[in-house]
Image: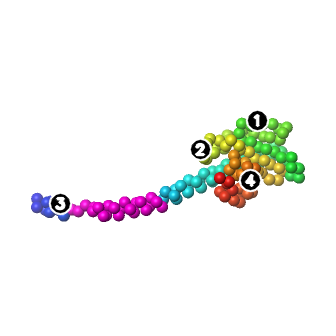
């Protein structure tokens, strides 16, 4: 019985200073980690925009090959536009809806949480593919070559 009482008397807990030191250390770790996580989330959204552009490009390229579509790169007015939204298919005006023609399952989802893009299209002039996703790649879009070269930096916003 004497041993138990002496053991209980010698136990020490954390002092207030030790507890404050732990809280300060945790605060410093949180101050470093929160901005890093926010940056990772932002980069993931940018990567998703680039991946959506690649997906549209691949679907448009498949449509060009499958449908044997031609455009004269010397003629500014001769190009194909491929949409991935509710725009009707109109082959006479050189417009093709990638979703309706089953080159895409659905329009690409905007990673900003707004559902699908309001404008998702690819223009093909016989040489180059230009992708437009809302205004994320500028008002007139960017070529797939520029998007690939710039990666996340290709985004305007």
Q: Is residue 84 magenta?
A: no
3D distance between C-alphas at marks 3 and 2: 58 Å
| Picture coordinates of residue 59, whole percent (x, y) | 73, 46
Q: Does the magenta stretch include residue 16?
A: yes
From the viewer's side, name the closer residue of 156 and 7.
156
Q: Measured along the vertical axis of the image, is residue 157 above or below residue 100?
A: below
The residues colored magenta run: 11-32
| Picture coordinates of residue 48, whole percent (x, y) | 63, 51
| Picture coordinates of residue 92, whole percent (x, y) | 85, 37
From the viewer's side, name the closer residue of 140 and 7.
140
Q: Mark 4 points at which residue?
A: 142
For marks 4 and 1 on the same chain, the one whose residue lies earlier in the sequence: 1
Q: Along the horizontal axis of the image, is 60 left or right of 27?
A: right
Q: Name the residue under label 2.
A: 113
The answer to whether residue 6 is visible is yes
3D distance between C-alphas at marks 2 and 4: 22 Å
From the viewer's side, name the closer residue of 80 and 103.
80
Structural crowding at the residue carrying mark 4, measured as other residues with C-alpha within 10 Å and reported as few (<14), some (14–19) or many (≥20): many
3D distance between C-alphas at marks 3 and 4: 74 Å
| Label 1 vs label 2, nearer the camera | 2
Instruction: Identify the residue at the far left of this view.
Output: 2
Q: Mark 1 points at which residue?
A: 88
Q: Is mark 4 on a helix, strand or loop?
A: strand
Q: Is mark 2 on a helix, strand or loop?
A: loop
3D distance between C-alphas at marks 4 and 1: 23 Å
Answer with the quarter of the image where residue 105 lies: top right
For marks 3 and 4 on the same chain, the one whose residue lies earlier in the sequence: 3
Q: Mark 3 points at which residue?
A: 8
Q: Measured along the vertical axis of the image, is residue 60 above or below residue 30?
A: above
């Amino acid at each position: 019985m004497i041993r138990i009482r002496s053991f209980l008397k010698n136990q020490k807990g954390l002092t207030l200073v030790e507890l404050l030191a732990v809280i300060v250390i945790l605060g410093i770790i949180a101050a470093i980690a929160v901005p890093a996580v926010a940056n990772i989330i932002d980069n993931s959204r940018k990567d998703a925009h680039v991946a959506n552009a690649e997906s549209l490009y691949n679907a448009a390229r498949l449509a060009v090959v499958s449908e044997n579509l031609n455009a004269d790169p010397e003629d500014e007015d001769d190009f194909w536009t491929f949409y991935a939204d509710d725009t009707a298919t109109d082959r006479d005006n050189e417009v093709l809806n990638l979703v309706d023609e089953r080159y895409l399952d659905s329009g690409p989802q905007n990673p900003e949480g707004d559902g699908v893009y309001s404008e998702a299209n690819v223009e093909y002039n016989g040489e180059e593919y230009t992708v437009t996703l809302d205004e994320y790649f500028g008002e007139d879009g960017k070529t797939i070559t520029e998007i690939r070269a710039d990666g996340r930096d290709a985004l305007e916003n």
